[in-house]
Structures are given as C-alpha cells and as structure tokens.
Amino acid sequence: MGTDGDALKALLLAFVLLIASSVGPAAATGSAAPGSAPYQWYVPILTYHFTVCAPPGTPAASRYLYICPDLFRAQMQAIRDDGWTFITMAELGTLFMANLHPDPKTVVVTIDGTDSGDYRVAYPILRDLGLKATFFISPGRLGRRGLQTWDDLRAMRLNYQDVESHGMYHLKLIRLHGDALYHELADASDAIEANLGYRPSVICYANGFTNAEVRAATRLVSGLKIAPQTHTVKPPHSKPLEDSTKPLQMIRLSARPISPLQLLDVIQPYVNG
C-alpha cells in the first residue's frame, strides 16, 4: 500500500468482508471509495419473481414475471462463465454502508415472493452452479398452499443463500400509515430473527413502491440498512446509479425472460462503473 490511509482502508475492507462473506462461495470483494464523501457507483442487481414457466392464460402484461427453469439456469450459468462474482444483498449492503466499492463484474441476484418454486426450482439451480442469491420473503404468508416454509428457508441458508424481508404480508406500503406501516416492516424482521436466528438488514418494498413516509418508518426498524427498488430495463439499456446518500433507494433491474446473451448485454455496461 502506498499510504497509511490506503493500508487502513484495506484493513477495514478485510474486516468488513470477513463478516459479510462468512456465508458461502464467491465472497464479496471491493475497493475503498475515494475518501468518505458521498459517491455514485453502479452494480447490477437483478430481480426475478417466478422461476417457473408462465401458466396458460397468464395475461401478456404479467408474463415478464415468469422465467422457465431452463432459461433461468442458462442465464445464471452465462453470467458465471463470463467471470462475474455473485454476492448477496446483505454483502452488498455491508460494502455500501462502509463506502466501499464492489469489484468490477460483481452482480447481485434477487428473487421476490415467498413462492415454493423458489425452493424447488431456483435454489437447486443456484446450489448446483455454486452461486448465491437473495430471497425476499413475507413471513406472514409462509406455509400457505404453494408457498415456502421456514424449513425450506433454513435449508437454503445452510447452502449460502441470503433471506431478507419483503414485509410481513406483502402489502403495498405506500397505502399504510402509522402503526400499521411500522408493524408491516418490523413484524417481518422480528419473525425472521425468531425463526432464522438473525436480524435482516435489507427490506424489499412490496410492489416496488416507496415514499418519504415509508423510508422514515424503515429507519425506525432495528437492523434494516438498505432497500432496493425496481427499474424496468428498456432498450437502449440504461445504467441506473447507486447513490451512497440514498441507501433506502437502491436500484434493481427487472430481469426479463430474455436470452443469456441479451442479459449479458444488459449488465455489461456495469463492468467499468
């Protein structure tokens, strides 16, 4: 290291990543942001919902939410084989809050919804490929017909997957106020802590909507540090930025059921971000 400051940053990074990456393959890595001033950076955070083929009769406007298992596997394998490092939202948040840049070609995969297909389809594919992702769950919906169970989530956690909050009942937060808003956020964190043994650090706003009141309530919930929103990718592919002053407004890309090569084209601009 050229300076004492650089050495200190390197030591901080090593400590941060030791904590953040104690779960699994492809540990998060990064480099120090310039000083402690606010900064902007880019990292692709991909959003998936149902890793099953769209059922017959699915409205055209909703078909983008579904991706057939073979295509999901092909997308994941293509990203891995192109040299990208997979980290979780929790690991990304640790780097983000410490003003540390992820290394180039770092990607985050997120899967929303609590659907049992996450455990039966997405998780085995990720496990077989040696990859990890973040699953956003709504504890109040677990165990219902066609949805995941706590046992499913414990098994996923043992194999390096990250489980974070999607609100207690997957309610549209901008329609809630006061105690109802707070409990939709806090009760989900409490349930995850009680059943999985840790406090979630990430909240994914159900339906992707947020406002100043929602973010203020989020700050009151112990443990929550970052929150992603969803940005729909449309040609020409835009490259949303992450702003270190807005940890509760991180940007995700909606991963449409497109070919692996098309998906690589979407995330390629982030390499030199």
Image: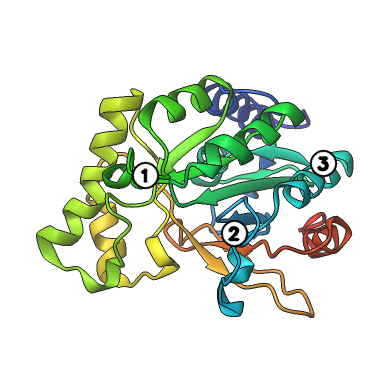
Q: Which three-letter amino acid code belongs to the residue tagged 2?
A: Tyr
Instruction: Name the residue at 72% across, 32% down.
Output: 3
Q: Is residue 1 above or below residue 225?
A: above
- Residue 160 at what x, y percent from top left? 58, 25
Specify whether residue 239 is in view. yes
Quadrant, the C terminus: bottom right
Q: Is residue 267 above or below residue 168?
A: below
Quadrant, the N terminus: top right
The answer to whether residue 84 is left or right of residue 58 is: right
Instruction: Name the residue at 25% across, 69% down.
Output: 213
CA–CA distance between discs 1 and 3? 31 Å
- Residue 186 at what x, y percent from top left? 22, 46
Task: Determine the secondary structure under disc 1.
Answer: loop
The residue to which callout 1 is attached is 145
- Residue 93 at what x, y percent from top left? 51, 44
Q: Nearer the viewer, mark 2 or mark 1?
A: 1
The answer to whether residue 267 is left or right of residue 57 is: right
Label 1, residues with CA under 10 Å away: few <14, some 14-19, many ≥20: few
Q: Which three-letter amino acid code belongs to the residue tagged 3?
A: Gln
Label 2, residues with CA under 10 Å away: few <14, some 14-19, many ≥20: some
Instruction: Name the residue at 77% across, 74% down.
Output: 237
The reply to whether the C-beta atoms of the residues labelled 1 and 3 are less than 8 Å apart is: no
Q: Quadrant of residue 266?
A: bottom right
The residue to which callout 3 is attached is 77
The residue to which callout 2 is attached is 39
Q: How many marks?
A: 3
**Quick one: 118 or 174, which is closer to the camera?**
118
Q: Which three-letter amino acid code belongs to the residue tagged 1?
A: Arg
- Residue 99 at what x, y percent from top left? 56, 46
